[in-house]
């Protein structure tokens, strides 16, 4: 028989995971556009006086950060900046250097020290492990002396930075790579460095236990079905007939289609059932549960009747149901792979589901084809805004992917049958490169 229980599983503990994002009036940097992964972090730090960018107006989020730059940002963010009388004797740090006082202050506060050869090497790149150590030390956080389990598949519990990695993982201030590894030895980029600082400051300011992942995610609003939902920047949004698919592609295992879940992949497929028979919510959920071994949990989430069906015989799939205020039923089917990235993907799915909201005034979309395509063309070659353009099209499907791309990353070709156009989308930078009439990839 079908079982109804009230207990927590990974997919159920959802209340309170969505926070309001920091809202800036306009983009402060020419290369960090709205609706891009680093926008809120960089704008937040800019408003706090922590970052200022380059003279040309850029922030350069993809550029690696060196020890001197990282130290300045950390001291400003943690409130430890100020004049210092600390004596230093690094042959590569001089009083006339812009970073001289920052180095003195960092040494004084035991945040940084020199190398065994007596140098400081201010121009050296800093890696993720080193970044976590000096950031967490500067914020004077209560860190564990040791950890019981390996924080990540490639971070053994005995390595020198394991406690920093464990704290960062638990607080959701860093996120693993697509294969589940932390890759802590890699040089950190300015955008990722800003993200870590921002998330720590945000947690402290909002008095939170962890950083809520969906805070900065883009929001998809369905043009007709009265709901909105957030989804991670690294996921794709696809339209499949009456369904909306949110897909984390397992590129490491060469996945090319969302129809089958690969080890490090996940999907959330959302549909609206009109509930024409106006069944009571619990009756509707029971009717749509074909398994006799499943477990149902019902509650209220975001002020809507909500149910979760988990499947002990297949723990990789979970079904979610919302009764929206217009009495339609939003159904979300989620599935996750068994790879090492599973814990991260489960948490992302949890946040996707927790972000579902009813949209009383669904915009209905742009019905005039010429007006719609004119709006889409406004986003061509606007870096980071390609997903916004794709969201204007409600029937786009990938017809081909050029995995080599144009040197910056894979290029996806989306076709809209309704509008008879193909959109060329550069995935890494989320940029719409071109739009062509008809169904083709030769442009």
Image (cartoon, rainbow, N blue to C red):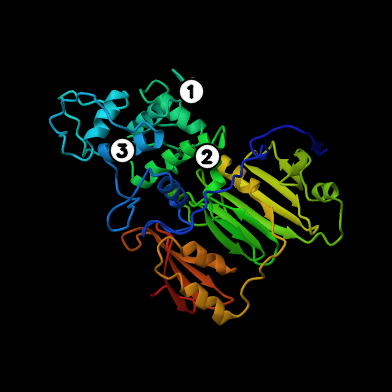
* Quadrant position of the N terminus in the picture: top right
Q: State the residue position of label 3.
A: 72
Q: Which picture quadrant has residue 435?
A: bottom left
Q: Residue at x 42, y 25 (%)?
A: 140
Please provide percent x and percent y for residue 90: 16, 28
Separation (CA) of disc 1 from disc 3? 33 Å
Please provide percent x and percent y for residue 137: 38, 26
Nearest to the observer: residue 326 or residue 436: 326
Q: Which picture quadrant has residue 16?
A: top right
Q: State the residue position of label 2.
A: 344
Query: What is the number of callouts on the image?
Result: 3
**Secondary structure at numbered mark 3:** helix
Q: State the residue position of label 1.
A: 149
Q: Is residue 151 visible?
A: no
**Secondary structure at numbered mark 2:** helix
20 vs 53, left or right, is right
Separation (CA) of disc 3 from disc 2? 31 Å
Q: Residue at x 45, y 38 (%)?
A: 174
Nearest to the observer: residue 439 or residue 192: 192
**Secondary structure at numbered mark 1:** loop
Labels 1 and 3: the sequence-earlier one: 3
Please provide percent x and percent y for residue 380: 42, 71
How busy is the neighbourhood of tag 2: few (under 14 within 10 Å), some, or many (20 plus)? Answer: some
Between label 1 and label 3, give the one nearer the viewer.
3
* Quadrant position of the C terminus in the picture: bottom left
Separation (CA) of disc 1 from disc 2? 16 Å
Labels 1 and 2: the sequence-earlier one: 1
Relative to 160, is 135 above or below?
A: below
Labels 3 and 2: the sequence-earlier one: 3
228 vs 295, left or right, is left
């Amino acid at each position: 028989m079908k079982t109804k229980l009230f207990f927590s599983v990974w997919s159920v503990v959802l209340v309170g995971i969505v926070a309001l994002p920091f809202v800036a009036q306009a983009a402060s940097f020419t290369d960090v556009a709205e609706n891009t992964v680093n926008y809120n972090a960089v704008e937040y730090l800019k408003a706090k006086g922590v970052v200022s960018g380059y003279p040309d107006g850029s922030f350069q989020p993809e550029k690696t950060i060196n020890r001197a730059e990282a130290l300045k940002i950390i001291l400003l963010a943690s409130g430890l900046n100020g004049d210092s009388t600390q004596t230093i004797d690094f042959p590569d740090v001089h009083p006339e250097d812009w970073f001289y006082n920052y180095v003195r202050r960092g040494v004084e506060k035991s945040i940084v020290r020199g190398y065994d050869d007596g140098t400081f090497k201010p121009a050296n790149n800093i890696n993720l492990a080193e970044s976590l150590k000096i950031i967490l030390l500067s914020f004077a956080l209560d860190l564990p002396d040791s950890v019981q389990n390996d924080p990540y598949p490639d971070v053994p519990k005995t390595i020198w930075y394991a406690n920093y990695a464990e704290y960062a993982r638990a607080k959701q201030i860093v996120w693993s790579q697509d294969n589940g590894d932390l890759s802590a030895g890699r040089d950190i980029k300015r955008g990722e460095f800003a993200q870590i600082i921002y998330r720590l400051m945000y947690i402290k300011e909002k008095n939170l236990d962890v950083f809520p992942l969906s805070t900065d995610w883009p929001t998809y609003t369905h043009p007709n079905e009265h709901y909105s939902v957030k989804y991670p920047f690294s996921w794709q949004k696809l339209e499949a007939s009456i369904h909306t698919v949110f897909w984390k592609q397992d590129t490491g295992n060469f996945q090319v289609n969302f129809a089958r879940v690969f080890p490090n992949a996940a999907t959330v497929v959302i549909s609206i059932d009109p509930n024409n028979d106006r069944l009571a919510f619990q009756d509707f959920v029971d009717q749509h549960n074909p398994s006799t071994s499943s477990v149902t949990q019902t509650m209220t989430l975001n002020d809507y009747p909500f149910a979760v069906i988990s499947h002990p015989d297949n723990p990789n799939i979970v079904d979610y149901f919302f009764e929206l205020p217009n009495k339609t039923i939003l159904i979300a089917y989620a599935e996750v792979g068994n790879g090492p990235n599973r814990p991260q993907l489960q948490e992302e799915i949890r946040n996707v589901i927790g972000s579902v909201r009813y949209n009383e005034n669904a915009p209905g979309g742009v019905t005039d084809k010429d007006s719609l395509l004119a709006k889409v063309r406004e986003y061509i070659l606007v870096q980071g805004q390609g997903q916004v353009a794709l969201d204007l099209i409600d029937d786009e499907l990938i017809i081909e992917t050029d995995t080599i791309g144009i040197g910056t990353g894979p290029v996806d070709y989306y076709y809209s049958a309704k509008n008879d156009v193909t959109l060329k989308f550069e995935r890494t930078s989320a940029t719409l490169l071109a739009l062509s009439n008809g169904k083709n990839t030769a442009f």
